[in-house]
Amino acid sequence: MKYLLLAALALSLYNTTVTAQSRKVIRVKAGDDIAQAYSKNGFYRLPNFSKAALYYKSGSKNDGILFNFNILSGKMQFISPKGDTLDMAGTETVDSIVFPQLAFYNIDGFQEVAAQIGTFRLLKKPIIKMQAESIGAYGQPNPTSSIANYTNYFSGTNVYNLIINQDIVIIETITWSFMDASNTVHKPSKATLLQTLPDDKKATAEAYLQKNKVNFDKEKDLLSLVNALSI
């Protein structure tokens, strides 16, 4: 297929000024499995490569390709007809990839739909950095250097298992945004929530916000808000 042969390009339609961020830190002892410390799927989003519908911006689609999202590299990967695991290329022509249980939109890289209410979608994009750590004075951990070349520590695309003989800190930063019916993204706020929600949910949102203090930069608050509006 053509998209297998094209070079991958990053889109310029999205920037960090339209996102909120949450952060998580995971400390891993030397010799422990870093990938499994992050999640039971390692650094993959799904436990296995799964069939998904690939939608192009032109309106066409392909069905049945096996995909999985590599969180560590930020790349969508697929199984080729020869059985190889490859990074997806030609992403400038791609609109979205939809699995039976979740979906990704291609906006400055693939971003997962964390929740959806009609045409309103809450998007999330995790970014992982790893840092070597040593123990300093009084037994306190001290970060020593960023592991910019962590891809060298695992073989090929195997990110289910990753072991390094050094204490490691995994830093996960998730950017959040609202997407409206026209696939435009917005920084989460009360104003953009009411702007992007379907009309029949706006009164419910107003009532929820009057009763609950919502920090639109906080993951828990965002998810609680959207879950309440989904009822």
Image (cartoon, rainbow, N blue to C red):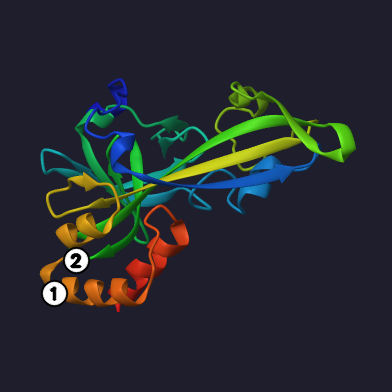
Mark 2 in CB contact with mark 1 (< 8 angstroms): yes
Report x, y in % for residue 177.
31, 49
Q: Is residue 199 left or right of residue 222?
A: left
Tag 2's secondary structure? Answer: loop
For marks 2 and 1, give the CA distance.
10 Å
Confirm whether residue 162 shows in the render: no
In front: label 2 or label 1:
1
Confirm whether residue 128 shows in the render: yes
Report x, y in % for residue 53.
27, 50
Q: Name the residue located 21 percent from the left edge and 60 percent from the top edge.
A: 120
Q: Which residue is mark 2?
A: 118
Q: Name the residue located 11 percent from the left edge and 38 percent from the top edge.
A: 58
Viewer-closest of 32 and 196: 196
Report x, y in % for residue 31.
81, 38
User: Callout 2 environment at 10 Å: few (<14), some (14 to 19), or many (20+)?
Assistant: few
Q: Which residue is mark 1?
A: 200
What's under tag 1, amino acid-wise?
Answer: Asp
> The N terminus appears in which quarter of the rendering?
top left
User: Callout 1 environment at 10 Å: few (<14), some (14 to 19), or many (20+)?
Assistant: few
